[in-house]
Every structure is written in C-alpha cells, then in structure tokens.
Image (tube, grey):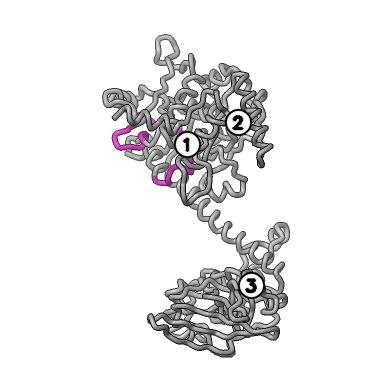
Amino acid sequence: MTGQITLRDLAAIDVEVLKGVGEKRKAALAEYGINNVLELLMNYPRKWVDRTNEARISDLVAGQEALVIVEVRKVSKFTTKNRKTIVNVQVGDESGRLTAVFFNQPWRDRQLKAGLQVAMFGKPDLYRGVLQMSNPLVDLIGDRTGRIVPIYPQSEKVQVSTWELATWVENALERCRERGISDPLPNDLRERLELVERTSALWSIHFPDSMVAKQNARRRLAFDELLRVQVVLVGRKRAFELDNTGIRHKVGGKLQQRFIAALPFAITNAQKRVINEIDRDLAAPHPMHRLLQGDVGSGKTVVAVSAMLAAVQGRHQGALMAPTEVLAEQHFAGVKKLLEGLSVPDENNLFGDRQLRVELLTSRITSERRRELLRDLANGGIDILIGTHALIQEGVEFASLGVVVIDEQHRFGVEQRAALRNKGSKTAKSVVNSPDVLVMTATPIPRTAAMTVYGDLDVSVLDEMPPGRTPIKTAWVAGAKSEAKMWAEIREAISQGQQAFVVCPLIEESDKLQVASAEDTFKLLANIELKGLNLACCTVECRRAKKMRR
C-alpha cells in the first residue's frame, strides 16, 4: 500500500498486528474496548505524570493525598482469621520507603512484582513510624525515567496495564512513520488556527516532551472531534434538504407588514436582521431549520410570530410548541395580545379580510372543546395553534402546517421534533411537505457551541435589547451584615408596592444536602426578617389546595 495512512485505514487494522499482542492480550483489549489500531490511538491518557518533576517519598506528608513514582521491592500476602486477604507491598525510591496495604485485593501479589516501576496515588498515614497507604491507586508505568508518562484509564476486571498500552501505542505510531498519517487540514488553515499537524498531535498526546506540547496536542485532537461531529451533522442537514420538499412561502406580504406596523413599539435592528434571515429561509424551496437565540426580553416572540404569519398569509398554518402547560398558556396569552385586532387579507372573503384565529391545545382542554379544535384544525379553520406535547399526539391533524416554532428545544427529544415536522401537509402524491422549523432558546450559547449542539440548525442571534428595558442588576450577598442590608432593601421595596420572590433549591429539609429549603426559609422570614408582611409559600399553598380537592 502507498500514500499516507487515513483514520479509516487505521480502523481496518486489527490490534493483533502489534508486537506483544497475542490471543490473550487481544481478548483483554477487546474487553477493554479496543479492537483496532485507531481505537488504540484514540484511547487517550486520563492524566500525565511529569517524571522530570515528580514527588519523592521524602516529600510526602501524612494525611495529604499525593502521587509518587516508586519501585516495587517486596510483596507479601496473608489471610486473616476471618478469611480476608491482605497484600503488603514494600516500595521505595532514592529518598525513602513506603508501605502499601491492599485489603481484599488478592490479585495484587500477581500484579506487583519486585522491580516494577509504578505510579501510586493515595493518602499516606503513619503506622508504627513508617508511611503507609491503604488501597492506593496503582498504575504500572514501566521504565520511563526522565519522561512525561501517560496514565491510561484502567479497569480491575481487565488486566491491561498502563505500561502495556503505552508500549502498544508507541509500536503503532512507530510503524506509521514511513508512510505518515494523513492530515485533512490544509497548511494555511492550520497556521491560521495555530494547530499542530495530526501526526505530531498523536505523538504528543501519548508521549509529550512537555506539558505545553500535551496541551497543543489536546487542542488539535479536540478540534478534530468537533470537526467530525460538525461534518456529520451538516451532512445530515443537507441530506434532509435534498430528500424533503419544503414550502416556498411568500414573505413580506400584507399580513406581516400589518403585524409590524401595529406593534406599540419599534422593533430593534437585531429583530429586523433576524426576520430577514428567516424570511430568506422561508422563501427557499427546502425546509428551514434555524435556531433563534436571545436573552429573555430580546424580542424572540415577535420574530417567531412574524414567521408564523408568513405561513398564514400563504394559506398555511403555524404551530408553537412549549415544554410545559404553564409556558404554553403564557405564550398563548402573549401571542393573542400581540395579534389583537389583526386581520388576514383574503381574496375569497366578501370584505377582503378575515379574522385571524389563534387557539390553545393542552391536556387541560375538555373533551368537547378538544374535538371542536381538532375538527377546525383539520379543515383549516385555525391559523396558529399553541400547545405542549399535545400537538404531536395521534389524532392532531393540520390542514397545511407551514411553520413550526419550538420553544426551549433542549426540553424536547429529536423524535418529538420529527413528529411535529411530519404533520406537514401531504400532496396529491402523498409526499409530505415538511414545514419550516424555528427553534427558540434563551440559553446563552456561543456560536461555536451552538453549531455543535444544534449542528443541524442555522443560527440567528438577537444581540440587542429593545429600548426602555430596565437593566437587571445582580449582586452577591455574604455575611450577616450584608444579608441584613439585603432584607432591609427588600422591606423598603415592598413598602413602595413592589414584590419580591425568594427561590430555594429544596422544598423540604434534606439530611443529604445542607442547603436552604423553601419551607424552613418561609418560617424564618415570616418570624424574623420579613415579619408582619404578607408572605406566601407556594409549596405550602399547593399542599393545602390538594387536601381541599381530596
């Protein structure tokens, strides 16, 4: 074979070709999770021990955890009266000696032989004047004096040592030298991103000459992993676009214009930019998959409603799915208010316009009302439907679903999103016209992370807050004096007609977690800091309501 070695080539090479890997070691590696050379090279160390600057036994302090590189000098094993096994291991370095005691680990006397170099981590204590570690973590590292030693993840079940893994990795990399390992990144891109080339990264992640080299290798290999994920996700997105028929919406029509003009405030430049980005997607022949990111109060709802109205003005429908009934009801109230008095241009209507209809569908809707909504939804009588998971249940059929808005995407699974998308309208040939999908999140996600987490979505960011918003001030309070000042400020705000909310991590007191509970905090505030004020604890009130219903 000629040419540089690709990762696909390495994946096709069985580990049995490596020096020292026979049938037994091959079986052990398979149980460990390594079957080919690529899996071996990508089994990165969990930590690195700098032997050029290692701790010595004479540096150990009783009661303080530490890691030392030592030589095994003597091993003994005995069984107690109650048939428990104890293995004593005498180890040392040029500065002193140490005893390691292993309880109920009889295999240690087979693992640890005199002359072995091991990395030992644990908490030393004084026992009869000698330092002793009980059940320390042990890694066999072999003779690698003066080097930074890789320590690989290990399992007591699979007897594959760090020293063996390092030996096989080194053998594999040495045998790749002649042909070289291919690097898909062009030189100019590597230089611009300040990334080392792939072969150097693989050597340095396993056998770094310095901790800086290890960090550079880690950065390059992390970039490769993210790049592979992104390529797969983008590939899936492109395949979806090719295999699915979208709706070419007519954007910028009278309905969208009326909506923007009727708003009691001017939209921000960021909202204008994002609406234009979404409109370009809606006008395209392939289905939109876009993530709308923006802080609370940045105006995501206005943007989402504009997208759904683009569907409505083309005689399609819009849907907004929220993760909880409370959030769905809030969206319904907010959207109804935004669209109050808005009419839809309709050539078939005698008056040229018709009333826009927005409805809510959750599990709280009564059976009779639900049947009415489902009937009107199926015949096109509902323009925008807002709800929870109820929107993707069997029996919910849209006449022509054009735009789907999903709030807080991370609360829904991929299957749920696909189920809503599959409710698109069917053509005469029974081909589903996939609706355009807009995902909203208030979670602040940097663009690079968003492209990884939501790799099948394009990203739009609302990075501008509407004018007149009261800025949010955050303060950290610690100490009795600061807390007293905080409660005084809260009392003052309440006296001026404002409200305050206290959020606690627990409802009731916990023996496991030493944190404030809502019930205890309520009692404390009612009797001390906020005594005399009108207080309520939602957990207490909810329990009272449940008892009354019973």
Residue identifier under label 3: 62
Q: In the displayed structure, does residue 550 sit left or right of residue 155?
A: left
- Pinpoint residue 230: horizontal percent, then vertical percent: 55, 54
**Amino acid type of the residue that numbered disc 1 sits on in the rendered structure:** Glu
- Whether residue 4 is visible, yes or no, is no
For disc 1, the marked residue is 519
Q: Residue at x 72, y 77 (%)?
A: 52
Q: Is residue 281 left or right of residue 466?
A: left
Instruction: Rate crowding at label 2 as few (under 14), some (14 to 19) or many (20 or more) other CA atoms within 10 Å.
Output: many
Which residue appears at 38% of the width and 32% of the height?
Answer: 543
Residue 95 in percent (x, y) is at 70, 83
As helix, strand or loop, the secondary structure at mark 3 comes to: loop
Q: CA distance from mark 2 to mark 1?
A: 34 Å
Q: Residues within 10 Å of mark 1 (few under 14, many from 20)?
A: some
Q: Over which residues does the magenta segment extend?
A: 390-415
Q: Nearer the viewer, mark 2 or mark 1?
A: 1
Identity of the residue drawn at 56% across and 16% down: 262
Q: What number is the disc on residue 112?
A: none
Q: Which residue is mark 2?
A: 298
- Looking at marks 2 and 1 on the same chain, the residue that comes earlier in the sequence is marked by 2
Disc on the earlier residue, 3 or 2: 3
Rendering coords of residue 150 (x, y %)? 61, 74
* Residue 481 covered by magenta stretch: no
- Determine the CA span between mark 3 and mark 2: 56 Å
The amino acid at mark 3 is: Ala
